[in-house]
Amino acid sequence: MDPDEFRRHAHELVDWMADYLDRVSDLPVTPGMVPGDIARRLPSSPPEQGERFEQLFADFQSLVLPGMTHWNHPGWFAYFPGNNSPPSILAEMLTATLGAQCMSWATSPAATELEQVTLDWLRRMLGLPETFVGVIQDTASTATLVALLSARERASGYSAGEHGMADSGKLTVYASAQAHSSVTKGVRLAGYGLDQLRLIPVDAAFAMRPDALAHAVSADLASGFRPACVVATVGTTSSTAVDPLHSISEVCRPHGIWLHVDAAYAGTAAIVPELRHYFDGMEQADSLVLNPHKWMLVNFDCSAYYVRDRDALLRTFQLTPEYLRTEHDDKVVNYRDWGIQLGRRFRALKLWFVIRSYGVEGLRALVRKHVALARELAQWIEATPGFELVAPVPFGLVCFRYCPAGLGEAAIDEINRRLLAQVNQTRRVYLTHTELNGRYVIRLVIGQRQTEREHVQAAWRLVQEAAANLKPRAVG
């Protein structure tokens, strides 16, 4: 493809992209597919000769697009938001065009220094102290693994001295029973072993109980274990519960336990002054992660990881073979030493574009709107006979269930499964579920860039209509 042909096709794609962003609300949120539908329509072997771009784009529209779930649809109320925005999309186009490998300052000085400045902007927006420095990881799962590895190395150093390794089987990790599954996976990958993970009980609001954490830490110390890391969550996946960071930090501090805060979804809310109280104590953490690609209008993937002890991070990950050494290494940041990956994309560009395009106040306005809509929906649910709110609503997630009078818990679970299936079968909205206190609960999260009050009202109407059409079934 020569430059003129590229230019022509690129203009066609940009026109299509603009139309898509404008009309995504007219599409079904989810595809009407069964497993194998797409694969059956694709050739089993690659083409021997190159094909024209016109054919590729035609097949994208006829084969790929009908099988896509539209995460940026205003009727997307599932999981957590996976946002994008026009400035972020344009930045991704530039990133792809440059094709830079941003593993070190020498391989792309602007990428490194822009990441430093942009992450410091974001630190200021969040209200984190100057002692924190940031780096962009791909996802929060990776950031949590980085924290667990750093905590392991620090605890090993304390236990065995700088030149030895303590028995990793004696190091313990703590998280609430509501923590994200990435904590369990990270504990396994970091070599602690799942037997060394302590899941701490939660209170009535599904937040970690500091008294239970203190008891678990004391019991492990008495048994000869070395508590290495506590993972606290602000905005748990099931219910957006808020672990009490200040009280948890008071348990960690006397024992030198690494405190990592997982705020992957909710962390964006810390830019809003009246919501920052949910993050009280985050300045006491050793590390913190939030995902601008969830609630800050940045395309996936872009996960901001902040650490208070940069030296601990570098001791864990820094390794410089001769072929990567440069004359400026002692004067610059090389982000290849700040995490697991050697190769790195130029992720900072899209975050920089978004912050500059919307401004801090524009991003705050978006979060405020979503939180207000979630709280209004919670009021509708509480005011409607037969429905109940199941968890507090600090951010954009509302957890509820349909509870017809006279039904036992098993029957209520069963009717809510059917209700959710009926709502999602309309393909006008998409909701998901979880379990809280062993009960089936429907989750509706408000966080998409184009979601307005009318879309929340439409979703609530669909829920009520489905409930009115359902009749209880016998549950064995």
Image (spheres, grey):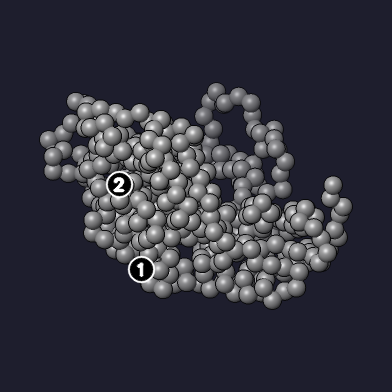
Q: Position of residue 21 (x, y in %)?
A: 54, 59
Looking at the image, which residue is at 64% across and 63% down?
Answer: 390
Say the numbered circle drawn on residue 256: 2
Quarter of the rendering containing residue 63: top right
Residue 42 in view of the camera: yes
Of tags 1 and 2, the one toward the viewer is 2
Q: Amino acid at mark 1?
A: Val
Closer-to-camera residue (166/116): 166
Residue furthest front in the image? 222
Residue 207 located left or right of residue 427: left
Residue 398 located left or right of residue 272: right
Neighbourhood count class around disc 2 (C-alpha, 10 Å): few under 14, some 14–19, many 20 upward: some
Q: Is residue 135 above or below residue 194?
A: below
Q: Is residue 233 above or below residue 187?
A: below
Quarter of the rendering containing residue 357: bottom left
Residue topped by disc 1: 360
